[in-house]
Image (spheres, rainbow, N blue to C red):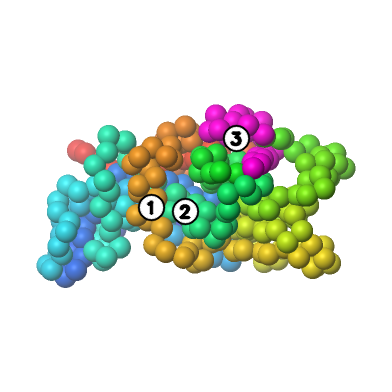
């Protein structure tokens, strides 16, 4: 069977390639594509090419349908909608890595389980307490997933920061009343952060940006003895920090990447989506075919301000 997939070249260019896929083997499931989210890792790979330390795999936020099951597979059957895979039309996966989704009227592009699972781990590692003061740095796609959960938490103070006012409007729509746009001028931004921190600061600061500026903002806001939750991935070789500030402030730095998970976050992520506690529809800004993915990536890299989250439809073409 022929299957199409995305390929990233050393210069970051996107092409569509064709491969041959055989029948699933023992303990495997063949998944037919439906949709796959575009991760910030994909964007960084296309921007930096071989300069990035680790290339993104060809999609890892895939939603598809069981096409065939191999010998010995139980609990999955043809037609089940599942979370597994990437951009490919057809692929064989170990059944233990294929997760059946709850019955739901939501379209495939609004069932992006993997990024929601990452946010579940971020919330778990933040160890939030009732009455905490929390600052959310960055209201991109992942930050706005956090916003939906933080707005439902019993916090004494919740602040969201971003450089784009349109993203802050979405955060307010999810229930965060206190949102601030960071000024472009460094001196003005520093003055605003001093004002926002006040005499006490924030018990937990969640940095979703994956940038040096986001890390610096978190350090400027965290309370004495507070926690900086590093959720965003700084994809370069180095990041800078003021060791005296961190030492004298006594803050704890928590890495909340998927590898830091304290439980399997996928079941919780699926429950959050199926119950509507996390809504993806307001955040999926672009939906394209596999053939149009390269064009969309050019717009993203050019700084398209309307972009929040892109999804590639991966269903096989019909003749």
Residue 257 lies in the magenta stretch: no
Q: Quadrant of residue 247?
A: bottom right
Q: Quadrant of residue 176?
A: top right
Residue denoted by label 2: 120
Could you say which is closer to the camera, residue 214 or residue 93? 214
Number of numbered discs on residues: 3
Residue 169 lies in the magenta stretch: yes
Residue 296 locus on image (x, y percent) = 49, 39
Could you say which is closer to the camera, residue 9 or residue 260? 260
Task: Mark 1 or mark 3: name the one nearer the start of the chain.
Answer: 3
Give the class, few, some or many, for how many residues have Cα within 10 Å of label 2's Cα (few <14, many ≥20): many
Could you say which is closer to the camera, residue 269 or residue 296? 269
Residue drawn at x 52%, y 54% as measured from the top left: 123
User: SS at mark 2?
Assistant: helix
Image side of residue 205 versus residue 109, left or right: right
User: In this picture, which residue range is highlighted in magenta?
Assistant: 156-178
Are the two marked residues, 2 and 1, in contact with CB atoms closer than 8 angstroms? yes
Marks 1 and 3, how far apart in space? 22 Å
Task: Mark 3 or mark 2: name the one nearer the start of the chain.
Answer: 2
User: SS at mark 3?
Assistant: loop
Residue 179 locus on image (x, y percent) = 67, 34
Residue drawn at x 28%, y 56% as measured from the top left: 99
Residue denoted by label 3: 176
Residue at the extreme front: 131
Give the class, few, some or many, for how many residues have Cα within 10 Å of label 1's Cα (few <14, many ≥20): some
Q: Does residue 167 appear in this view?
A: no
Residue denoted by label 1: 268
Residue 198 locus on image (x, y percent) = 81, 44
Where does the N terminus fall, quadrant-wise? bottom left
């Amino acid at each position: 069977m022929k299957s199409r997939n995305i390929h990233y070249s050393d210069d970051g260019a996107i092409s569509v390639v064709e491969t041959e896929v055989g029948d699933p083997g023992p303990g495997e499931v063949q998944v037919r594509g439906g949709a796959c989210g575009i991760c910030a890792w994909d964007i960084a790979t296309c921007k930096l090419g071989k300069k990035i330390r680790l290339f993104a795999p060809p999609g890892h936020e895939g939603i598809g349908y069981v096409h065939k099951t191999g010998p010995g597979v139980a609990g999955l059957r043809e037609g089940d909608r599942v979370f597994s895979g990437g951009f490919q039309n057809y692929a064989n996966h170990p059944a233990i890595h294929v997760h059946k989704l709850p019955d739901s009227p939501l379209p495939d592009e609004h069932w992006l389980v993997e990024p929601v699972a990452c946010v579940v781990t971020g919330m778990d590692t933040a160890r939030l307490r009732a009455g905490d003061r929390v600052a959310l740095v960055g209201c991109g796609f992942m930050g706005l997933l956090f916003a939906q959960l933080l707005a439902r938490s019993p916090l004494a103070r919740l602040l969201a920061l971003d450089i784009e006012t349109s993203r802050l409007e979405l955060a307010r729509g999810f229930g965060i009343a206190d949102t601030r746009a960071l000024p472009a001028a460094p001196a003005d931004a520093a003055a605003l952060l001093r004002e926002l921190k006040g005499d006490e600061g924030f018990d937990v600061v969640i940095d979703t940006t994956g940038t040096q500026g986001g890390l610096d903002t978190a350090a400027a806001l965290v309370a004495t003895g507070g926690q900086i939750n590093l959720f965003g991935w700084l994809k370069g070789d180095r990041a800078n920090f003021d060791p005296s500030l961190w030492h004298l402030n006594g803050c704890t730095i928590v890495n909340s990447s998927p590898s830091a998970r304290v439980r399997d976050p996928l079941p919780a992520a699926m429950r959050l989506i199926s119950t509507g506690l996390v809504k993806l529809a307001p955040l999926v800004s672009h939906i394209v075919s596999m053939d149009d993915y390269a064009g969309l990536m050019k717009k993203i890299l050019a700084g398209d301000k309307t972009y929040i989250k892109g999804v590639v439809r991966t269903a096989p073409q019909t003749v």
